Amino acid sequence: MGYDRVATMFAPDGHILQVEYAGKTIRLGSASMGIVCTDGVVIVSDRRQKDKLIIEKSANKIFEIDDHIMAVAAGIISDARVLVDKARVLAQQHRVTYDSAPNTESIVKDIADVKQQFTQYGGARPFGVAMMFAGFNGEPQLFTTDVTGNYLKYKANAIGENDEKIRDKLRENYRDGMSVEEGIRLALGIFRDIQGEEFNVNRFDIGIIGSDKRLTKKSGEDFA
């Protein structure tokens, strides 16, 4: 009793319960999938907006961090917005200081450090959001940060609702040497299998960063 009231107290079994609760929040968010391909990296994100009064484009969760870096979030998107703003500032500071494009992993590491701090100090709760960062620094790259502030590099990954089911599908079907279009069609096919009758290709946003190091945004209906 009481171990789940602050993020600075370990439970007797070694867990930080506030951090674990934040991790459960992420799985309530809509799903996104990232895939590294030979000619770029793609993120496919489900808007999951069913209210016809909402302008769906306003629910787009794919954020541009720099010309060659994008991010997507699952969980509390207002939390993600704070981290996205921080990442954009870091990217611009790097360009002003070094007159060169920032490295994707350095941005990811700095954001992961911020997330870790909010699991260690009192008076604030952990960020209830997982984020995937995709970029092109000589090669396409994909990173995922979790609530604890850890980050890892992936060939393909998923965050949000049904993330483990999606990862199982990726383990079965992902292969090295896929093109961007093949990666997008793989992602949409997995979403179709997972969502069943609820699947609607029009509710997916797609971000692509290719060898031109420029972010291109498309809709799922472009690949219907």
Image: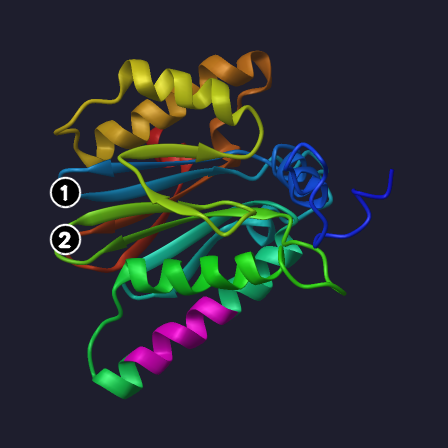
Q: Let me know if residue 32 appears in the view.
A: yes
Q: Amino acid at mark 2?
A: Ser
Q: Residue at x 82, y 48 (%)?
A: 5
Q: Position of residue 222 (x, y in %)?
A: 35, 36
The image quadrant of residue 176 is top left
Amino acid type at image mark 1: Asp
Give the distance between the C-alpha atoms of the residues marked 1 and 2, in whole angstroms.
6 Å
Q: Secondary structure at mark 2?
A: loop
Give the residue furthest to the front. Answer: 12
Q: Nearer the viewer, residue 92 or 51?
A: 92
Asked whether 20 or 129 is in front, the reply is 20
The percent coordinates of residue 8 (x first, y second) are 70, 54
90 falls in the magenta region: yes
The residue under label 1 is 39
- State the extent of the magenta-drawn residues as a range: 86-94
Image-quadrant location for residue 38 = top left
Q: Measured from the top left, where is residue 211 in percent x and y?
A: 14, 53
Residue marked by disc 2: 211
Residue 50 location (% of width, % of height): 68, 33
Seen at 73% across and 63% down, the residue is 122
Q: Magenta segment: does it hold 9? A: no
* Mark found first going from the N terminus, 1 or 2: 1
| Residue for point 71% across, 40% down | 17
Residue 51 as seen in the image, left or right of residue 68? right
Image position of 37 (left or right of 48): left
Q: Residue at x 31, y 23 (%)?
A: 186
Q: Which mark is residue 139?
A: none
